Structure formats: C-alpha cells, structure tokens
Image (cartoon, helix red, strand yellow):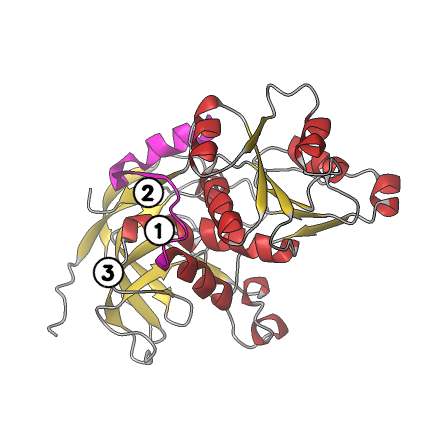
C-alpha cells in the first residue's frame, strides 16, 4: 500500500494562555518520534477536561501554547523508527494517557494511569483538536477496521473512564447504581455500560432534555435534582428495597452532589468519584460513614486493558451513546454550551471542517 500523502501544515484550535482566545489557525504537522505514530484525526470528542485545560483551573499546569483534545479517532499515517505494534493504515485512537514511563511500580502493575511521569494528550502535550496528532504507539487505542470513528471518539475517554468506574464500584449484575450527571457526556455512556453489564440504574441530573435522553436509553428512574425537595430521600426511595443504591458514580461538575452521595448510598455501599469540579472538596458525615461502612474512592482513567474492554463493548453494538457532530472550527461554541450545562450527550468535532 502506498504511503499516504502527509501535508506540511494543518488546521488546529490553539490557545496561548489559559482562558485566552482559542484561535483556529494553520500550524505545522508534527513529526513522530522513534516510539510514536502520527494519526490523521478524523473526529475528536469534546470532554469537560478540555474545558479545564483551557481555563487552567486544575493544580497541574498545562503546556502553553496548547492544542487541546484527547478523544481523537483516526488513521495511522506514519510510524516512528522503533514502532512495530501498529501499521500504517490502522485505525487508532488518541486517549487522555498519551504515554507513561513503563518502568515505575504503577506501570509494571498495569496501573499506568498512576505513573508519576504521565504524558497527557491535550494537556501536557498537544492533543486531538488538530488534523494530525502524535501519540506514543504503546498507548494508542486499537480500533477495528470499519468502525464508525465519530461514534467511537467519545468512548476513548468518556467511555473508558466510566467503564473503569463501574468496575471500581464492584457492583454486580442485578444490583443498583446511581449515576449523578447521567445526562452528560460521561453519564450517557455510563448508562449504556451499566445496562450492558446487567446493572439497574437510577439516573440523577436536571432538565427535561436530559430526562428524555436517559429514558430513551432504557432508564426507568430519573431524579431531577433541581426539582426534588429531598434528593437523599428520593434516591433511597427509588432503590428496590428503599435502602439506597449499592453504589454511586459521581460525574457531576459541581461540589454539592459529592457531599450528598454518602448520605443516600446503602450501608456498605461504594461512592466512586470521577467528576472533577474545580476547587471542590469531599465531605461526608464521619459517624454515619463509619457505622454504615461506606466506602468512598476515586477512579481515574482506565489502563490499556480497560480501554480494550470498553472498545469491545462498543464494537459489539452494546454502546450507542448520543452525540452531535460539528466542525472543528466550532470548538469555542461547544465550550460555551458546556459552561452553561446545556449539552445532553456528547459533541464530536469533524476535524476536516
């Protein structure tokens, strides 16, 4: 097969300072290093983390200038000199974890997301809001031929992240889990994975559009936290035995839901924190948490095995999360909607526009 023609320049969304102007402009196409590949990004999902990267409101500083994005799906067009696990023409995904050291205790224990020297797409290195993106070959997600790249793009972060959270919750088929932020990008995928895993769901969010979307995905119980007079009692009442869900997955972008979860989860239940609201803190009543044996834990992104499993759910047709396609040039508009909490599902950028 003839090598694809790679241009010298490309279009990208770039900002030079946190919260500064996001400029859609022409930049050079990067060159892959010896252990890297160059991927022609066809579609890129937009994650709330991208908004945090732009604002720079996390304690980890961003690379500047920066091309954001970490849910990029496309085709491998060039290999570094040491790469032998990927071929030109393969479909591949750029994930949040672009690379790791491979030699620390965490990397050797299949916990590479906890590597103390991570390379993060769209944060510490340029990400997928450009037409050609470089990624470490060992960490790219392998995507089967014929896959709908627009549909799988959100799985590369949102899907893998919530799938990992569900595994961390240790909820078994037939049990119940509450998903807070169920109508958002991560939540819409969490609903799908939970259903595929045989888990009952209590969806928590606000807005008629999000309620409609959750119900269209098979959710029978939706609690609108803005309309509820007592979220804690309503969630407990929605569980089959009135004792609360076996676990809670927190995908919210504000602090309050993180304070409520330990109150309504059932005794010996698990609260899994995934969402990362800026400058927020976890608080839980100590006495009740002790005597009810509540577990509160964090869940980060999945490792490479989790990623492959999450993608397998998608390729078997079990994950069909809602998304809307807009051009790469429209990224600032997507951020505006995200800041207003006005997005149901996920926005995916067509990087050719």
From where the camera sits, is residue 28 visible?
Answer: yes
Judging depth in this view, the residue of 315 and 69 nearest the camera is 315
According to the picture, the residue beneath numbered tag 2 turns out to be 348
Residue 314, percent from left and from top = 39, 56
Q: Is residue 46 above or below residue 206?
A: below
Residue ID at (56%, 44%): 58
Rendered location of residue 110, percent (x, y): 56, 71
Cβ atoms under marks 3 and 2 closer than 8 Å? no
Dot 3 falls on a residue whose secondary structure is loop
User: What is the secondary structure assignment of the residue under circle 1?
Assistant: helix
Q: Is residue 205 above or below residue 84?
A: above
Residue 66 seen anywhere in this rendered image of the structure: no
Q: Disc number at residue 153?
A: 1
Of 27 and 106, which appears nearest the observer? 106
Residue neighbourhood size for the residue with mark 3, other residues' Cα within 10 Å, grouped as few (<14), some (14–19), many (≥20): few
Instruction: For marks 2 and 1, give the CA distance.
Output: 7 Å
Cα gap from disc 3 to disc 2, whole angstroms: 18 Å
First along the sequence among labels 3 and 1: 3
Residue 320 horizontal side relative to residue 76, left or right: right
Q: Which residue is mark 3?
A: 146
Residue at x 12%, y 74% (from the top left corner)? 1
Give the image location of residue 251, x and y in percent.
57, 41
Camera-side residue: 11 or 20? 11
């Amino acid at each position: 097969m003839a090598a694809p023609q790679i241009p010298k320049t490309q279009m990208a969304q770039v900002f030079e300072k946190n919260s500064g102007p996001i400029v859609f402009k022409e930049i050079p196409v990067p060159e892959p290093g010896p252990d890297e590949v160059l991927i022609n990004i066809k579609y890129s999902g937009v994650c709330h983390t991208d908004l945090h990267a732009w604002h720079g409101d996390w304690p980890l500083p961003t690379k500047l200038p920066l091309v954001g994005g970490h849910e990029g799906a496309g085709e491998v067009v060039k290999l570094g000199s040491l790469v032998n696990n990927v071929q030109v023409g393969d479909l591949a995904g750029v994930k949040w974890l672009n690379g790791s050291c491979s030699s620390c205790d965490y990397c050797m224990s299949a916990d590479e997301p906890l590597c103390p020297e991570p390379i993060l797409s769209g944060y510490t290195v340029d990400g997928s809001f450009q037409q050609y993106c470089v990624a470490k070959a060992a960490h790219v997600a392998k995507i089967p031929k014929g896959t709908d790249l627009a549909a799988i793009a959100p799985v590369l972060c949102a899907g893998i992240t919530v799938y990992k959270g569900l595994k961390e919750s240790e909820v078994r088929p037939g049990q119940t889990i509450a998903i807070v932020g169920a109508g958002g990008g991560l939540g819409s995928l969490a609903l799908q994975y939970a259903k595929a895993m045989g888990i009952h769901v209590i969806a928590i969010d606000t807005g008629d559009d999000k309620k409609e979307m959750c119900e269209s995905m098979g959710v029978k119980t939706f609690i609108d936290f803005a309309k509820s007079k007592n979220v804690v009692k309503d969630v407990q009442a929605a569980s089959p035995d009135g004792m609360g869900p076996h676990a809670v997955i927190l995908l919210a972008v504000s602090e309050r839901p993180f304070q409520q979860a330990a109150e309504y989860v059932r005794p010996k239940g698990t609260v899994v924190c995934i969402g990362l609201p800026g400058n927020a803190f976890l608080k839980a009543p100590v006495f009740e948490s002790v005597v009810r044996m509540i577990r509160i834990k964090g869940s980060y992104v999945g490792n490479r095995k989790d990623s492959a499993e999450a993608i397998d759910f998608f390729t078997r047709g079990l994950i069909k999360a809602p998304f809307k396609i807009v051009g790469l040039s429209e990224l600032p508009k997507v951020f505006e909607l995200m800041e207003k909490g006005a997005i149901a599902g996920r926005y995916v950028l067509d990087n050719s526009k």
